[in-house]
Image (cartoon, helix red, strand yellow):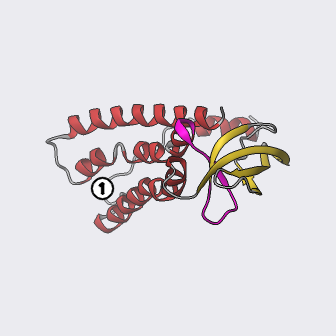
């Protein structure tokens, strides 16, 4: 047999399962659970400013017109827009979302720094909620895993059902947010 075929066959061979003493101990498991919790909470932290902008809590309202989108390669784009303030009609050039299309005109909120504009209204809010929905999906099965690690039998079934429901809600929210961001 050739080396490639042997490697392919070897990939599907059963491997020994970890036995007692081969799993993380209490300290290692605690570190893993903390890492999981932090990973699930970070999307909430990183999305707060965009959510505040999309709801109009911070920033300046106005209209954003996309004037250019330059391809950076590998499906990435750098888009620039012309932001017109509602208060006085002043125009400034800003960075726009890379999923924009030249010629798009939409309601937007300018960041307090004045460098970027974020769409407002239902579309902007749904797009800003994409990351929090992702965080919900990451955290969905954490209660079940904690019950399992702590060897608590009561409540595992409820935790699995709740985790499955939260995963479906998370996936739906991420898809809706992505569709809103690209529309």
Displayed quadrant of residue 99: top right
The quarter in which the N terminus is drawn is: top right
Q: Is residue 163 left or right of residue 65?
A: left
**Looking at the picture, does residue 111 appear above or below residue 182?**
below
The quarter in which the C terminus is drawn is: top right
Residue at 45%, 47% (x, y): give it. Answer: 132
Residue at 62%, 38% (x, y): give it. Answer: 181
The percent position of residue 113, horizontal first and vertical second, equals: 64, 66
Q: Is residue 178 left or right of residue 154?
A: right
The percent position of residue 154, horizontal first and vertical second, equals: 13, 42
Q: Is residue 5 left or right of residue 135?
A: right
Range covered by the magenta-colored residues: 110-123
Q: Nearer the viewer, residue 81 or 145?
A: 81
Displayed quadrant of residue 38: bottom left
Q: Nearer the viewer, residue 41 or 108?
A: 108
The percent position of residue 108, horizontal first and vertical second, equals: 63, 46
Residue at 70%, 61% (x, y): give it. Answer: 115
The percent position of residue 55, horizontal first and vertical second, equals: 49, 47
**Looking at the picture, does residue 28 appear above or below residue 72?**
below
**Looking at the picture, does residue 76 appear above or below residue 175?**
below
Q: Is residue 114 left or right of residue 27?
A: right
Indicate whether residue 114 is drawn in magenta: yes
Identify the element where label 1 is drawn. loop
Indicate whether residue 146 is drawn in magenta: no
Q: Looking at the image, which residue sits at the far left?
A: 154
| Residue underneath mark 1 | 20
């Amino acid at each position: 047999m050739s080396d490639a075929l042997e490697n392919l066959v070897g990939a599907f061979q059963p491997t020994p399962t970890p036995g007692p003493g081969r799993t993380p101990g209490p300290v290692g498991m605690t570190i893993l659970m903390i890492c999981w919790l932090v990973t699930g909470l970070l999307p909430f932290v990183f999305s707060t400013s965009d959510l505040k902008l999309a709801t109009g809590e911070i920033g300046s309202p106005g209209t954003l017109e996309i004037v250019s989108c330059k391809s950076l390669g590998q499906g990435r784009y750098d888009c620039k827009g012309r932001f017109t303030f509602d208060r006085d009609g002043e125009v400034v050039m800003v960075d726009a979302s890379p999923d924009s299309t030249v010629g798009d005109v939409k309601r937007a909120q300018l960041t307090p720094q004045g460098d970027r504009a974020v769409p407002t209204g239902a579309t902007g809010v749904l797009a800003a909620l994409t990351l929090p929905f992702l965080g919900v999906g990451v955290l969905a099965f954490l209660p079940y895993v904690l019950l399992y690690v702590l060897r608590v039998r009561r409540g595992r079934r409820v935790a699995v059902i709740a985790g499955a429901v939260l995963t479906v809600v998370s996936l739906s929210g991420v898809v809706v947010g992505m569709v809103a961001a690209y529309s």
